[in-house]
Amino acid sequence: MRSGLAGPTAPPDRRRAAVPLRRRLTPYGFLLPAFCLYAAFLLVPIGRAVQLSLYEWDGLTVGTFVGLDNFATVASDPRLREAFWHALVLIIFYSVLPLLIGLLLAAVLNRGKVRGLPFFRTVIFLPQVVAMVVVAVAWRQIYAPNGSLNSGLRAVGLGSLARPWLGDYTFSLPAVGFVGTWVSMGLVTVLLLAGMSRIPIDLFEAARLDGAGAVREFFAITLPAIRGEITVALTLTIIAALKTFDLVYVTTGGGPGTSTTVPSYEVYRRAFQLGEVGAAAAVGITLTILIFGINLVVNKVGDRSST
């Protein structure tokens, strides 16, 4: 005789119905406080920004509904297109170069069993704990016409290369990007070192018995084992590259001309200098979508590679 109660062989829907409603709702109750904070400090401001992006508003008077005109301006304004292009270029300096340098440094430090590794790890990570404004002021002094970089070049007979780095239309963006490389390199190296330290030593010993050299060990064992750390490092540094503001604001102010302007700086300029709050919100929303899209692709590729 079959029982009417849900048992081990009962269909999933019947077993689910047998669980009291209060018990099913308990996990959501634990999540509710965190979700309320998340909604209050992230979802509501994003929703407000989306609303503002649909208006032409100077921040003081009554706004005028313009629909998607502000987003059309983002696509058609040469200055804004240039700003987004600069942000994409900064990804090379904030993400790609630190990843390549970090892989090399982490592999050398991990394989060489360097004495005082915690000290080197702390020194490499140090730029991450310094406020970006302080970093920007320090590098502005280094890049100055009479700064230490030009003085060093003149001292070794390379005075022809000396220039006002942050005032040069060609070199100002790479100069700002190099600061991002210096800051991101420590974070990437520490993440990769943590991943490499978890690789079983037996794998390396087996590879050496098979005659594998250091390069083959790196590509056959180390690199596949740290794909997760590489994905995390790329996610964090790409976000830092696309939302950078304080470094540009302090070092160049977007200049010379528009050589170093970026979307975050354009948001500030349009909202607080030009009084175009709606257009600034549209730039911010577009930047948010770009950051989300790029990192979604990075994480999809990282997840696919690790399976």
Image (spheres, rainbow, N blue to C red):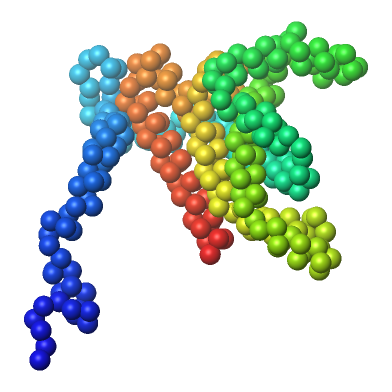
Tell me if 80 is positioned left or right of 224 in this view. left
Tell me if 94 is positioned left or right of 289 in this view. right
Name above or below for residue 247 compared with residue 106.
above
- The image quadrant of residue 140 is top right
Give x and y (percent) for residue 186: 63, 34
Q: Looking at this view, is 91 or 227 the one in front? A: 227
The residue shown at (65%, 39%) is: 189
- The image quadrant of residue 259 is top right
- Quarter of the N terminus within the rendering: bottom left
Q: In the current view of this chain or complex, which residue is farthest to the bottom?
A: 1
Give x and y (percent) for residue 274: 39, 15
Give x and y (percent) for residue 118: 67, 35
Q: In the current view of this chain or complex, which residue is farthest to the right?
A: 157
- The image quadrant of residue 209 is bottom right
Tell me if 193 is positioned left or right of 42 in this view. right
Q: In the current view of this chain or complex, which residue is farthest to the top?
A: 146
Name above or below for residue 194 compared with residue 245.
below
The residue shown at (70%, 43%) is: 106
Can residue 246 be seen by looking at this rendering? yes
The residue shown at (54%, 20%) is: 131
Can residue 89 be seen by looking at this rendering? no
Q: Looking at this view, is 302 or 74 the one in front? A: 302
The residue shown at (70%, 14%) is: 142
Q: Looking at this view, is 303 or 177 the one in front? A: 303
Give x and y (percent) for residue 65: 22, 29
Q: How many marks?
A: 0
